[in-house]
Amino acid sequence: MQRLDVVVIFVYFTILCSVSAWTYPLQTTGCNHQPGRCTLVSGIDVGSEDIQVLPNGLAFITSGLDPTTPGKIFLFDFKKPRSGVVALDIVGDFDRDTFSPHGLNIWVDTNRILIYIFVINHGGKNKETVEKFRFDATSQNLYHVKTYQDHRTIIHLNDLVVMGEDSFYFTNFYQFDIKLEILLRLRLGYVGFYDGFRGHVIIRRLFIPNGLNTSPDGKYVYLTEFSGKTFSVYARMSDNSLCLKQRVPLCSLVDNIDVDIATGDVWVTGHADLQLNQKYMIPPHTSISPSQVNNYCLCSSPTVQWLERRTLN
């Protein structure tokens, strides 16, 4: 055996051992609570990537990442849970056939009482965009308003949180190949800010950054790193930069974040097994991957927030 072959085998074995050691604890630990009955929502056939809820109980849900069918945005009413979902019609100059929604966020214009939905759209090769829709409650239609695009910074988006009528933070969760970046533990992800004209990278060297959200007062931005298995709290500066206040390990492949606007508590979804999660992501998505919903109580002081209590549901 040549020396080069020995080196290649050694490197491969080292990487394999590293990945196995990293994922092993996630395959052996867990705490299962059943706070209430769990039922499937009728009308969604290929799963979903994200959900956002208005204070009145209306929820906007993106369809799953199925490349064989055009994506949709569904409407669900928590006050009428047995009614299932309604697929919202999209009105305007918009390519519905290539629509591939991912993360979404809601912006309410309190002055004009208008509801806007911002949605990440993978939309085909080299067409990564953020789409802005106006929701009309009477007709239950989505009216396409605007497309945001920046080839320098908006590359492979996962989630976003809207801060103004044309501004938002976003996570770019990988650069080239997500499986390779996870395998080699490459920190190539980042958080960006779109100011209405172009995107700016404001936090670099993140390990598959995923979910984003804000505190109810908008002073803090919350971030999860999927492969980093962390929940981070950032203070928002006047120039829209972010200052890290706390990073907390959660021992879970953390995903989306939701915030209770009344209490400030956060709900963080996660995945318990990396290998099963990656297997599930392969079409036709028929395998089973265990998931988690974690509820955290956040306490606050004038300058910092921190996690006080953790429960696993």
Image (tube, rainbow, N blue to C red):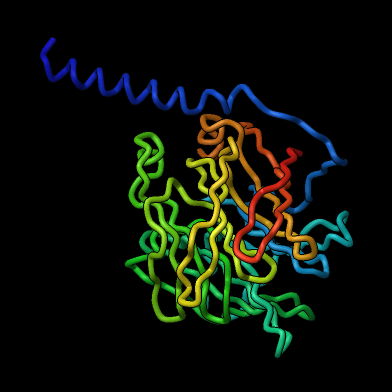
Q: Quadrant of the N terminus?
A: top left
**35 to 18, vertically: above or below:** below
* Quarter location, residue 80: bottom right
Q: Quadrant of the C terminus?
A: top right
Residue drawn at x 66%, y 48% is: 307
Counting the numbered discs, the total is 0
**180 to 97, vertically: above or below:** above
Tell whether 278 sits left or right of 7. Answer: right
Q: Residue furthest left?
A: 2
Tell whether 285 sits left or right of 22. Answer: right
Residue drawn at x 52%, y 80% is: 166
Q: Residue furthest top?
A: 1
**130 to 50, vertically: above or below:** below
* Rendering coords of residue 300 (x, y %): 69, 59
Residue 307 vs residue 171, the one in the foreground: 307
* Quarter location, residue 144: bottom right
Residue 66 vs residue 231, the one in the foreground: 231
Residue drawn at x 64%, y 57% is: 305
Q: Residue furthest bottom?
A: 112
Residue drawn at x 70%, y 43% is: 294
* Rendering coords of residue 37 (x, y %): 87, 41
Residue 80 vs residue 210, the one in the foreground: 210
Tell whether 253 sits left or right of 7. Answer: right
Q: Residue furthest front?
A: 302
* Quarter location, residue 194: bottom left
Asked whether residue 86 is in view, the answer is no
* Rendering coords of residue 35 (x, y %): 85, 40
**270 to 265, vertically: above or below:** above
Residue 59 vs residue 87, the one in the foreground: 59
* Rendering coords of residue 99 (x, y %): 52, 64
Asked whether residue 219 is in view, the answer is yes
